[in-house]
């Protein structure tokens, strides 16, 4: 382990005469009291008369720093570890208190100001030369840098640990929200408080898989999104998914991922949203649903419902679409797509032609062929929904749309 002394190659206290240490020692207790008094007066955050442990830590820090400084003047190779340990603990405490290191830096400057003021007032009494005073000043600044670095080490480790704890709590909260049956509202509220997450009125669940890009990169998500990217099935919970600008932020954050977004539900129903997102993602992998943006389940309800029991729909498709088996495969696909578009657009030949990028007369010709194949069933209102469902599933099956070996025309 690298010590603070090893990180400080210059050791400016070497230039301070050793006898100065002996001059300082009788005054250390009084100087410590003066420094503590000024620090507590100047920094309200440190003034805690009822907190004996905190007061003990402040005193330990001030007295330890003064002793260490005088020891270094006498013996530049004396151990740093006792005072370093104290300031690491102080840095740790600052992080746990939720403060940044500015307050600590201010307290160090206040303490140094008191020490320098006392030294300046006593310099004539002890006949300390200007050159020695300059050396002492340089040593004080270097010493402050070292103990500040020790505090920063403790602060950084505490923040890293806090971040790890917070992330763990948020993963537990995500699991709790997705549990079935739903967890008790109070349990969710208690864990949400520990995870620093405001329980929203609505949420949407998201499941993900990478688009295959390397190297792996976690998405940069808003801080209120609960995420677990490292699990076998990466997933998120999005608070207030229909809020202003939320969709655009998610599109940007998840551009390297294929993401299925479940419907917006009440927070206690997050598991229901997750179930639909899980239904959508396999369909995206198969190419049934588009993957060029967020896959919103609410925009693909017919497909999700149809493929919920795909086996049943295929069995019905074999029965209802049997007349199409007499048509050559390539032309069969054209007829199927035309029929599906006709059902979706009220048999409006112009609208269908626009959707399929063909001439309206081509649509009418294909529609005439379909009438010959299906007869009155084609326009039966009760059969339309069923027909649309089975056509959607049939088009997703590769063997049904395989092109013929030789070209065919309309």
Image: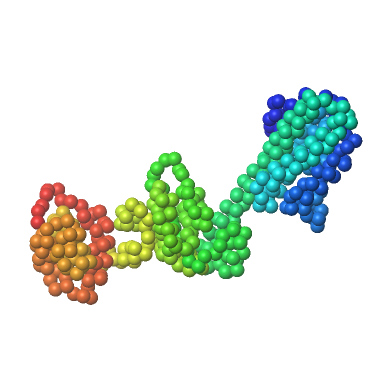
Note whether residue 255 is visible. Answer: yes
Camera-side residue of 146 and 172: 146
Q: Is 340 left, or right, of 241 in this rendering?
A: left
Q: Is residue 269 visible?
A: no
Can you give x and y, in whole percent of width and height, for residue 17 in the image? 83, 24
Would residue 340 appear left or right of 220 to someone viewing this image?
left
The quarter of the picture where residue 25 lies is: top right
Between 63 and 140, the one lying in front of the other is 140
Q: Position of residue 409 (x, y in %)?
A: 9, 53
User: In screen coordinates, is 269 left or right of 307?
Assistant: right
**Residue at 18 percent of width and 51 percent of height:** 403
Residue at 27% x, 61% y: name it: 393
Among the 4 quarters of the image, the one containing residue 82 = top right
Where is 392 relative to 58, above or below? below
- Residue 133, how many percent across, how many down? 79, 28
Q: How many marks?
A: 0
For image coordinates 47% across by 49% down, the residue present is 220
When the figure is inspected, residue 215 is found, relative to residue 281, above or below; the finding is above
Near-viewer residue (226 or 315): 226
Image quarter where the C terminus lies is bottom left
Quadrant that contains the N terminus: top right
User: What residue lies at 25% left-to-right and 71% top-to-bottom?
Assistant: 385
Q: Is residue 52 left or right of residue 336?
A: right
Q: Position of residue 184 (x, y in %)?
A: 57, 69
């Amino acid at each position: 382990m690298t010590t603070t002394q090893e990180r400080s190659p210059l050791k400016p206290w070497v230039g301070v005469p050793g006898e100065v240490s002996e001059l300082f020692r009788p005054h250390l207790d009084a100087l410590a009291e003066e420094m503590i008094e000024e620090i507590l007066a100047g920094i309200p955050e440190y003034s805690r008369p009822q907190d004996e442990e905190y007061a003990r830590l402040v005193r330990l820090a001030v007295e330890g720093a003064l002793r260490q400084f005088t020891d270094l003047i006498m013996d530049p190779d004396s151990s740093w570890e006792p005072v370093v340990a104290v300031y690491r603990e102080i840095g740790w405490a600052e992080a746990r208190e939720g403060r940044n290191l500015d307050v600590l830096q201010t307290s160090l400057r206040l303490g140094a100001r008191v020490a320098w003021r006392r030294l300046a007032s006593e310099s004539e009494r002890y006949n300390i030369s200007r050159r020695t005073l300059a050396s002492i000043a340089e040593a004080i600044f270097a010493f402050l840098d070292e103990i500040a670095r020790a505090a920063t080490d403790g602060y950084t480790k505490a923040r890293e640990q806090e971040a790890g704890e917070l992330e763990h709590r948020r993963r537990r909260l995500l699991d709790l929200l997705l549990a079935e049956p739903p967890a008790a509202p109070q349990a969710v509220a208690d864990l949400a408080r520990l995870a620093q997450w405001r329980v929203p009125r609505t949420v949407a669940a998201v499941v993900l898989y990478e688009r295959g890009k390397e190297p792996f990169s976690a998405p940069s998500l808003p801080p209120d999104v609960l995420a677990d990217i490292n699990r076998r099935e990466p997933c998120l919970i999005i608070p207030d998914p229909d809020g202003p600008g939320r969709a655009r932020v998610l599109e940007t954050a998840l551009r390297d991922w294929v993401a299925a977004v479940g419907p917006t539900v009440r927070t206690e129903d997050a598991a229901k949203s997750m179930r639909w997102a899980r239904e959508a993602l396999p369909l995206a992998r198969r190419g049934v649903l588009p993957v060029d943006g967020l896959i919103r389940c609410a925009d693909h309800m017919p497909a999700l419902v149809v493929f919920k029991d795909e086996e049943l729909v295929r069995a019905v498709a074999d029965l209802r679409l049997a007349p199409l088996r007499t048509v050559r495969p390539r032309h069969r696909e054209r007829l199927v797509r035309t029929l599906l578009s006709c059902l979706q657009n009220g048999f409006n030949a112009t609208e269908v032609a626009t959707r399929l990028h063909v001439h309206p007369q081509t649509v009418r010709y294909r529609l005439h062929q379909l009438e010959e194949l299906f007869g009155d069933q084609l326009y039966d209102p009760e059969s339309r929904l069923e027909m649309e469902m089975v056509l959607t599933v049939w088009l997703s099956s590769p063997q049904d749309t395989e092109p013929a070996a030789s070209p065919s025309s309309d």
